[in-house]
Amino acid sequence: MTPDDPATGYGVPHPSPLPANTASAETHELAEKWILNCLEQHNCSELGTLPPRRSRRGTNGSQSQSQGHSQNQFADADDELFADVVPARLIDLRAFGKDSEDARLIDVQGECGDYVALSYCWGKEPLQKYTTTESRLGSMKKRIVHDDMPRTFRDAFAITRKLGVRYVWIDGICIVQDSNDDWETESAKMGAIYGKAYVTVAADSSTNVHDGCFNQKSRNQIDDIPGLVKVPNVLVSKRTSRLYIYSTMYDLGVGHAASRSPFPIEHGHLSQRGWAFQERLLSPRTLHYTDRRLHWECRQEYLSEDNMRFIKQEPISSVLSSLPNLRVVDILSMWHSGIVMPYSKRHLSRATDRLPALSGLAHLFSRYLSAAYIAGIWSERIADGLAWYRSGTLPPRKLDGPSFTWSSQPTPVVCSTVMGNSRCSLADHSVVLAGQDPFGAVAAARLKMRCRLRRARVWIEPSDGEHLASQTWVKAWMEHDDGGTPAEVSWDCLEESAERERLDWTVFCLLLFKIGRRHTVLLLEQVDVATPQIQKEEERPGPDAGTVFRRRGIAKFRSIADWFNDGHKLSITLI
């Protein structure tokens, strides 16, 4: 559609002409305009200085680690989130004057000035020759030769310089990659580093550090939308115009778009990367360099280089600004559905990063929950945190870590939306942290639960057993001494090939929820604490003989009889 089309008088937008590519001067001028408008008109930077947290009332349990810091000690160190957190190092782009493109790695002493943060994909190639290691730290502080850097880094340098900003933060350069201590310290700051950045540059479509930030040829957003109806029109001026009609389902982020984000952001390579999830949500402002055009995202709006706004919803990061006004149950629901579920679909180069790559967001949520953080779940409404199930192909094993948490599951997960009073409670807990970050990796964790437990046999028909590995839920029969009932079962994993061929198991059922006749139960197996191996089925004692269990799956069924009405609650330990 052209600007002189009568439809513009009715608020129908028309696309702005695009420059050749996102490296153009026109694109850069627009980026500067967006940033200045946000700084002057919005309050997008305020998420990084939230008011003091709610007090932690009634939270039992302990936290421990080799360094001797507790989760609460870390969280209480400052009353404002990220207030005193600064990166240890930044890249100084003016170290050798305006006429040199070379830079230098500097140590940050106290407060630091404005800096740009880069969000990107590393790729599979070893990056030692581009990154900072203990042996290269000295030389990086002397000089970073511009032409020796990969294209994505060079593009980030260029964008930062054009914005008039002196410093840029890139994890591969600013963190000593082969130092466990430095990585532990700086990765724990990741949420703060992106949360306090002047702007984040996202190389959305780059698959590795050599692809760069800029595209080859920009194109209009109309190309992204499926099922467009094109209505040609001849204007009074004899010019030809074209009206495009599209489904409102695209506005709502469903169907082909399947997101609340512009198409090239949601479907870019960066959207598959685990670390980039919190980088995007915690950044107050982001310039998205996609393979189609430049997009803008802040906590109040999306903008596109072609001036078309097809996504009418607020940006994803805007939901975090609503945290102070939400009830605890709604905050937990946001954690499960808005954080854990989409994050679990993303890829990580190291499985041990599953919790560290989310620690900045966990830190943020802790400000509004009177609860302890236990390896990815919260102590408040503990049944909600335990009611997750696997999505996708059945894996051969879990990741190292507590069996009860989604963070030890190597597949995407779905968090149950069961609403109702839980039938179990958390009496106590303990967490042994793997490092300094109270929201990072854990070496071990235990939950002491007060619950109702029932031993049962689960068996599957041979015809349903064929779908055991490929389907999330399979039909089963669950029976105990007093009878049985049809059920749907979802196993977390089956660890041995022989176990995958089995069609029956003996488990213990922990009642999470009972709403009417509908039961939701965890499937547990008893373990020997001294040697945490699964005992043979015929040797398994009953609940009175031992109290330590690990999770194997989850099940749901309807039953007229109440399986769990016989006696008092038991105290058991989940590991």
Image (spheres, rainbow, N blue to C red):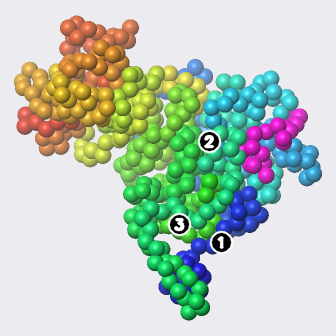
Q: Secondary structure at mark 2?
A: loop
Residue type at mark 3: give it: Ile
Residue 460: x, y in percent? 18, 25
Residue 222, numbered circle:
3
User: Can residue 458 be seen at all in this image of the molecule?
Assistant: yes
Residue at image coords 81%, 29%: 137
Quarter of the image with the C terminus is top left
* Type of amino acid at the residue the image marks with label 1: Pro
Q: Position of residue 452 (x, y in %)?
A: 21, 28
* 217 with respect to 280 (left or right): right
Splitting the image into 4 quarters, where does residue 376 fall?
A: top left
User: Marks 2/1: CA distance?
Assistant: 28 Å
Separation of marks 3 and 2 at Cα, in angstroms: 24 Å
Verify CB contact (< 8 Å) between mark 2 and mark 1: no
Residue 150 falls within the magenta-colored stretch: yes
N-terminal label among 2 and 1: 1
- In which image quadrant can residue 103 be found? top right
| Looking at the image, residue 364 lies above or below residue 403 | below
Which residue is located at x 26 percent, y 18 percent?
501
Q: Residue at x 55, y 88 (%)?
A: 235
Disc 1, SS = loop
Magenta-drawn segment = 141-158
Q: Quadrant of the N terminus?
A: bottom right
Is most of the magenta stretch helix, strand or loop? helix
Q: Which is more N-terminal, label 3 or label 1?
A: 1
Residue ID at (89%, 34%): 142
Question: Which residue occupies the extreme bottom position in the image?
Answer: 236
Q: Amino acid at mark 2?
A: Thr
Label ID, residue 200 = none
Please state which of residues 328 and 439 is positioned toward the viewer in this rendering.
439
Which circle marks residue 17 in the picture? 1
